[in-house]
Image: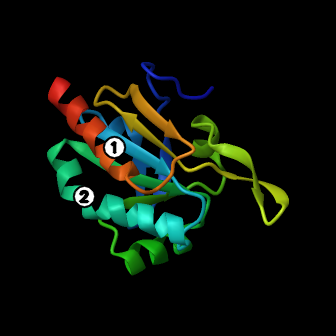
Amino acid sequence: MTVEIGKPVADFSASATGDTTVTLSELHGHNVVVYFYPKASTPGCTTEGGDFRDRKAAFDAANTVILGVSRDGLRAQENFKTKQDFNFNLISDKDENLCTLFDVIKLKKMYGKEHLGIERSTFLIDKEGKLAQEWRGVKVPGHVDEVLAAAEALNASN
């Protein structure tokens, strides 16, 4: 089962930074941004995370929680969060449960070789737990502003 616009997202629990477990149902009443990035501490992922960090106050004002997800282990996620001063939690999805739920593992090419990796993607879940919007194959420049505008519009409508 994968996510679908307008449908409830299956409840999930996942290990996150700060020695926490994030459970979607516990975020009920808040909009939730779940953004997937290929690898902690790489240039594009650092830029994207920094954009979310720098706009966190605006996401908070739009009643929206930010969660970053990659297949990196918790230690790598903690280091990434600390080094970049991220003000939101990062989820370790080594077992790819969330990657599978959101269908973000894709065949990618790097240096002429094919491998399976995370396609940079973002999902906006409304306060009732339904998928409101998705962005797949994300290009980092300007992306976070687009997600923020959608979160603000969603918050204004509910």
In which quadrant of the rendered view does residue 99 lie? top right
Q: Amino acid at mark 2?
A: Arg
The answer to whether residue 108 is above or below residue 78 is above
Instruction: Give amino acid for label 1.
Output: Glu
Residue drawn at (46%, 49%) of the image: 35
Q: Residues within 10 Å of mark 2 (few under 14, many from 20)?
A: few
Residue 73 as seen in the image, left or right of residue 18:
right
- Name the residue at 48% across, 45% down: 13
Residue 126 is situated, as x and y percent measured from the top left of the image, at 32, 30
Residue located 43% across and 61% down the image: 48
Q: Secondary structure at mark 2?
A: loop
What residue is drawn where x is 41% and y is 71%?
81
| Residue 77 location (% of width, % of height) | 50, 69
Q: Are marks 2 and 1 in contact (CB under 8 Å)?
A: no
Q: Which mark is residue 146?
A: 1
Indicate the quadrant containing the C terminus: top left, top right, bottom left or bottom right. top left
**Residue to which mark 2 is pinned:** 55
Q: Secondary structure at mark 1?
A: helix
Tell me if 83 is positioned left or right of 2 in this view. left
Is residue 88 visible from the viewing direction of this image?
no
